[in-house]
Image (cartoon, grey):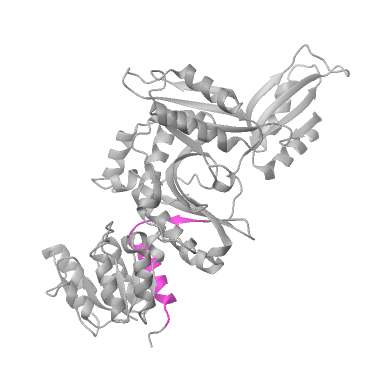
Amino acid sequence: MRLAVVGAGAVGSSVAELAGEYGHTVTALADSQSAVVDPDGIDVQAGLDRKSAEGVVGDGDVADALEGSYDVLVEATPTTLGHAQPGFGHVETALERDRHVVLANKGPVAERYGDLRDLERASAGAVRFEATVGGAIPVLSTVEDFGPSHISAARGVLNGTANFILSRMAAEGLGYEHVLAEAQDLGVAEADPSFDVEGTDAALKCVILANVLAEDREYTLADATVEGISDLPGSALELANEDGRTIRLIGEVTDGEVRVGPRLVPEHAALAVTGTRNIVQLETTHAGQLNVSGRGAGGPETATAVLADVDRLPPLG
Amino acid sequence: MSDSRDELQAYTVRLELVDRPGELLRALEPIADNGGNLLSIFHERGNLTPRGHIPVEVDLEAAPDRFEGIVDALRAEGINVIQAGAEVYAEEVTVLLIGHLVRTDLSDTLDRIEDSIDSSVEDFALSAPENTDGKSSARLRLATQSGETDAALATIRSIAAEKDFRVVEPLTAGGGA
């Protein structure tokens, strides 16, 4: 397939770099300022080199990439809330042109799921978004395979940054601020960590899961009850630890409710993953509990999920 | 890819031990060795059974699929297991409370939790802050009537909202609450 990759951060550039290995051709690569477009295939490395040297991937702009020649738009711009722009607009353009869309950007699926599905229905193209929940972990495709009606609940650890902080606090007996600074030094946490530690990122993923699982309603971030971990004292983890338990930031989709917050779990439970690892636990109607775990973030990891989605798309007519 | 250790259940095991040094320790080891987490031990020394044994009641929690192994291991050690099971006893739930617990009248908090849902505080541990402005953390284990765990959690949540402290709840089986 021919891919137009919009967004040249960790995920977008990894998709562009790995596409050839998966047998695809990248016909456009764009970031917010610039684009490089070639219907016969761009030189990905040259574009990325130019971005690191000059801050632009090419001489074109995003509109050129969106109007160019491609089968699949890979939307990997940063997640935005509310109207989910500019990501939603990119998706709209591609679907109106009857192209497929694969999303790594959570905004359009978490905040405008109904609008997105309406656009898809009117288009010959299809929308997939495995990469938006749990990075490399095949969460949504597992739900799809089992059928949403055969899954009664989902819960899991969906934010590696928060999980890293909680695991380090528990293991080393250190306070939140200390571990956060360490996580920032390691590049595990961003300079502004609020999206991760306040639970927003995990909540968006749960909202997306809820949208996929629900048969009769649409969810947005506003429907989620969200608590973060930034005001948890080290003493809370110590008390949990004395009792053979630990604290994890758990997202849950149960009985139509979406809830994210710190929860007590047995320290050897499957859900008590350590470090940046993620896990999702699905309650199935006929097959008990199913756990899928792995790397929930990172460029090549998330790109792997994007490229798996590309391979799931039907040929365009 | 599956693992069922997430849903711990509380069990009570009633044992009769021979009155001999080291007997209690010998009874507890198979529990810990087989994945049981000891919650409390009620050792009625001086109160002998008609057969001259000492009755001991052990509360523990374990994954349901491991509990049978614990009982088997006890019996294999020659320990006399009189009764084992979860059904006859109340449910237990552990929560953490975080906030200005002392300043907001801790004993009132605990009394109200016990009164409003007919539960009893089985264990309580407080970690006070180093300075007076800091927040305390507490761990609370409650025994409730069967099926009342959700009501207990709801009560704790409403008291916490009123007194402005946080509750870290357990994941209950099935994820409800």
Q: Is residue A210 left or right of residue B67?
A: left
Quadrant location of residue A47?
Answer: bottom left
Q: Main SS type for the magenta part?
A: helix
Question: Which stretch is magenta?
Answer: A292-314
Q: Is residue A10 left or right of residue A167?
A: left
Eyeballing the image, is A256 above or below A91? above
| x and y percentages locating residue A227 in the rendered image | 38, 41
Eyeballing the image, is A1 above or below A157? below
Residue B90 in sight in this render: yes
Please identify the quadrant where the N terminus of chain A is shown. bottom left
| x and y percentages locating residue A214 in the rendered image | 48, 61
Front-lying residue, A211 or A298: A211
Judge whether residue A299 is colored magenta: yes
Quadrant location of residue A90?
Answer: bottom left
Quadrant location of residue B38?
Answer: top right
Q: How many numbered marks have been drawn onto this rendered protein structure?
A: 0
Q: Residue at x 67, y 43 (%)?
A: B64
Please identify the quadrant where the C terminus of chain A is shown. bottom left
Front-lying residue, A76 or B69: A76
User: Which residue reaches farthest right?
Assistant: B51
